[in-house]
Amino acid sequence: MAINYGLSEQQIEIRNIMREFALERVAPARQELDEKEEFPHALLQELGGMDMMGLYIPAEYEGFGGGSLDFCIGIEELSRICIGVSVSYAANALGSYPILLFGSDEQKKKYMPAIAKGKKYAAFGLTEANAGSDAGGIQTTAVLKGDKYILNGTKQWITNGGEADTYTIIAMTDKNKGARGASAFIVEKGMPGFSFGKKEKKLGIRASATRELVFQDCEVPKENLLSREGMGFIVAMKTLDTSRPGIGAQGVGLAQGALDEAVNYARTREQFGKPIIANQGLQWLLADMATKTEAARALLYAAARTIDSGEKDVSKVSAMCKLFSTDVAMEVTTDAVQVLGGYGYMREYPVEKMMRDAKILQIYEGTNQIQRGVIGAALIKEYASQKK
Ligand code: COS
């Protein structure tokens, strides 16, 4: 029996819709998308037509109106089949959370409906060559001149880079103030001085587009500032707090996909005159894989529900579910390759791709070392405020 997570009818429906789409549309395409390193534009367009691109976007901005758990369930199902596709899908949320969380009603009305319908994609630009984990160390600048901000600098490894039309960019408006001198902007593809660098060649998630964003005296209208000057670091941190469960969902889905492959293979593969699943050693391995995956799912759903409850400080639980699920995904995909043995190492079976795809989950949206740092900082704060 599957665990009863008490999902709503809507959540079960989202799961069914996304599961069917992943099996029928994504599974037949994933290998070719990976080999050709091709962005899954057609699949995302289909998801747009199904109202799923705007799953996390409020109905007043033409979205589906789902919460964090609804969205995580959608990501989980896509991730069970292909992380390259699911990250291209989920990065739209990462790119648009700054607008949803900090934008004015006018900014939301201007940008969100097209993203909700899949007519435009979004991307988030924080990372730079010398500012990865140290997000406060960004060098891109934004200087107000008349009614425009002039942006200069280069953002690196931006998911959906080049494919997206709407970018939320963190740049320094006052370099003397450190993290408090950063500001967030909405930058559109085609704005003067905005171009793209090379498309990266990656170990995994090859269907996903990863590119540099280059700003050379890029002119951004003053009204595209999000919130107010100096709020950029907070915009970035709150965005990541909201978005990290999505990476947790990628981890859970990927681990489940690898477990599916491993169990099905072990049931049918015969050696020494019996299916290999009859060996206790293999059953124990599969049991550990299944238990870890379920534990990751339970933590993920609890984290998403905490966000949906309106809780303001979700840094710790968000980091915990990202950390745990993605470490589990790395372990479970590696074990799945082991279960399939030589076949697992070959491209004709999906587990080698799953193992390659798993690695980035421990790195992007904050390495798992950074997640441990966030959890540690939260513990220090919590215990310091407790009465003895
Ligand atoms: N929510 C609200 N405010 C936050 C916050 C959060 N989650 N995290 C930090 N802040 C605030 C702090 O309270 C502090 O405010 P004050 O200046 O008023 O004291 C300010 O932001 C600076 O915080 P801190 O000193 O903790 O910043 P650090 O430079 O030490 O960096 C980490 C903190 C490491 C957590 C941050 O740089 C980070 O998340 N790095 C990883 C970035 C990342 O995920 N990159 C992946 C690419 S983006 S897809």
Image (cartoon, rainbow, N blue to C red):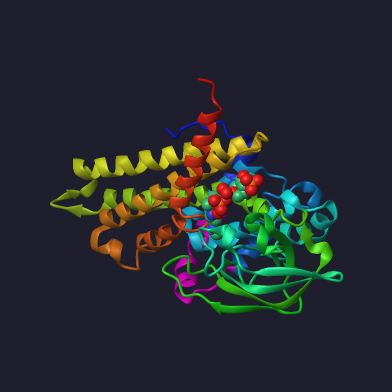
Which quadrant, please, contains the N terminus?
top left
Q: Is residue 47 visible?
A: yes
Principal secondary structure, stretch drawn in magenta = helix
Displayed quadrant of residue 2: top left
Q: Nearer the viewer, residue 346 or 367?
A: 367
**Front residue of 147 and 322:** 147
Residue 107 or 249: which is nearer the viewer? Answer: 107
Q: Position of residue 150 (x, y in %)?
A: 76, 73
Judge from the rendering whether residue 164 lies leftward or rightward of residue 247; answer left or right. right
- Above or below 27: residue 293: above
Task: Residue 178: name its quadrant.
Answer: bottom right
Residue 263 left/right relative to 119: left
Q: Residue at x 57, y 73 (%)?
A: 211
**Horizontal and vertical percent position of residue 296:** 44, 41
Q: Position of residue 232 (x, y in %)?
A: 69, 56
Q: Which residues are magenta?
A: 21-40
Q: Farthest residue in the left direction?
A: 272
- Residue 374 x/y as whole percent: 51, 45
Q: Is residue 194 above or below residue 254?
A: below
Residue for point 39% across, 47% down: 328
The reply to whether residue 75 is in sight is: no
The residue positioned 50% from the left and 31% from the top of the image is 4
Q: Is residue 25 magenta?
A: yes
Residue 354 located left or right of residue 74: left
Of all residues, the one furthest to the front in this rendering is 176
Reply yes or no: does residue 265 show up in magenta.
Answer: no
- Give the answer, above or below, for where 356 lies relative to 328: below
